[in-house]
Amino acid sequence: MINPKVTIILVNYNCMQYVSGLFYSLRNQIYSDFEVLVFNNRSDDGSLEKIHSLYPEAQVIEMGGNSGFSRPNNEGIRRAKGEYVLCLNFDVILENNFLEEMVKSIEQSPRIGWVAAKMLRLTATGKSA
């Protein structure tokens, strides 16, 4: 079976405090057939440089200004090479099997058009429901 590609779309506007956690969780995904598109809304907090250093394979698209959230996501959907698209916020950390379980869930039935994740609050001592 050939794994379908997933396109992950991220919209960055001064998200420095979240870059390490998010990109660490992307780097550690069990499922590896995915691309990352980062739409940069003219961030000036060093987040873009950190993304380049932690995850150089991410495709960075400069928006030329702060274009909000919807426009970059729509542009990402147009540019996506993946069969599935995942729009993520920067303030998440994915479990290592997130993409694998997402694809497995979608592939179970041709009637499934979208999926949503259960989100847990991350605290200093770990996750809580």
Image (tube, rainbow, N blue to C red):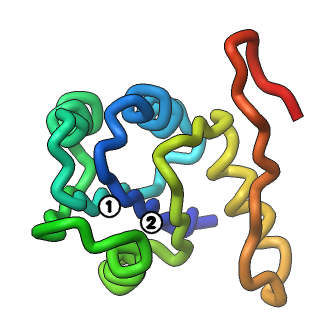
Task: Indicate whether 108 appears above or below 74.
Answer: above
- Residue at 69% in and 40% down: 97
- Residue at 47% in and 46% down: 90
- Nearer-the-camera pick, 84 or 9: 9
Task: Indicate whether 27 appears above or below 112.
Answer: above
- Distance from Cα at disc 1 to Cα at disc 2: 7 Å
Is residue 42 toward the left or the right of residue 20 in the image?
left
Exactly how many numbered labels are in the figure? 2
Looking at the image, can residue 125 be seen?
yes
Q: Are marks 1 and 2 in contact (CB under 8 Å)?
A: yes
Residue 15: percent from left, percent from top: 36, 41
- Residue at 45% in and 73% down: 82
**Residue type, numbered disc 1:** Leu
Residue at disc 1, secondary structure? strand
Task: Indicate whether 45 appears above or below 70.
Answer: above
Residue at the right extreme? 129
Tag 2 residue: 7
Residue 116: percent from left, percent from top: 76, 64
**Residue type, numbered disc 2:** Thr
